[in-house]
Amino acid sequence: QIVISLSISLWYFNRDRKLVSNATFLKAVSIATFYHLGTAAFGSLVIAIIKTIRTILTYMEKKAARSKQKVVLVIMRILKCLLWCL
C-alpha cells in the first residue's frame, strides 16, 4: 500500500509526463524501503499486540461466562469494546 501510494503521488506531482515509466515504481520501492519500512513495521507490531490482547480477553470472557461471574463478564466486555475502538 505504501509503494502504490508513493507511485501514484510521484506520477501525479511529476510535471513532465514523458519521464513517467517503470522507474517511477522502482523509485517508489526505494523510497518506501529506505524511509518508511520502520513505520510499517511499527504499525504491524502495534496491530499484533492489540490483536493478542483481544484474544486473551476473549478467552477470559468465555471462562467468566462458564463460571457465571456476571461482574467479571461485564468488565471483560467493556474492555473488549474499548480495544475495538483502538
Image (spheres, rainbow, N blue to C red):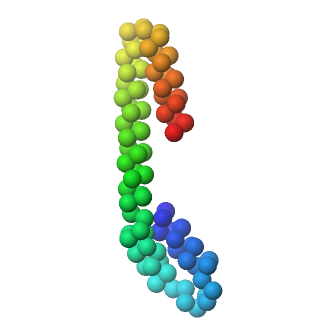
**Residue at 38% over, 71% down:** 34
Residue 49, above or below 29: above
Residue 63, above or below 57: above
Question: Which of the 4 quarters of the picture holds residue 16?
Answer: bottom right
Residue 56 x/y as whole percent: 36, 29
Near-viewer residue (18 or 13): 13
Image-based side of 83 in relation to 64, left or right: right
Image-based side of 4 in relation to 39, left or right: right
Question: Which of the 4 quarters of the picture holds residue 47?
Answer: top left
**Residue at 45% over, 21% down:** 76
Residue 1, above or below 11: above
Residue 66, above or below 28: above
Residue 53 x/y as whole percent: 39, 33
**Residue at 44% over, 14% down:** 72
Task: Give the number of callouts.
Answer: 0
Residue found at the far bottom of this picture: 18
Residue 57 x/y as whole percent: 40, 26
Residue 58 x/y as whole percent: 41, 26
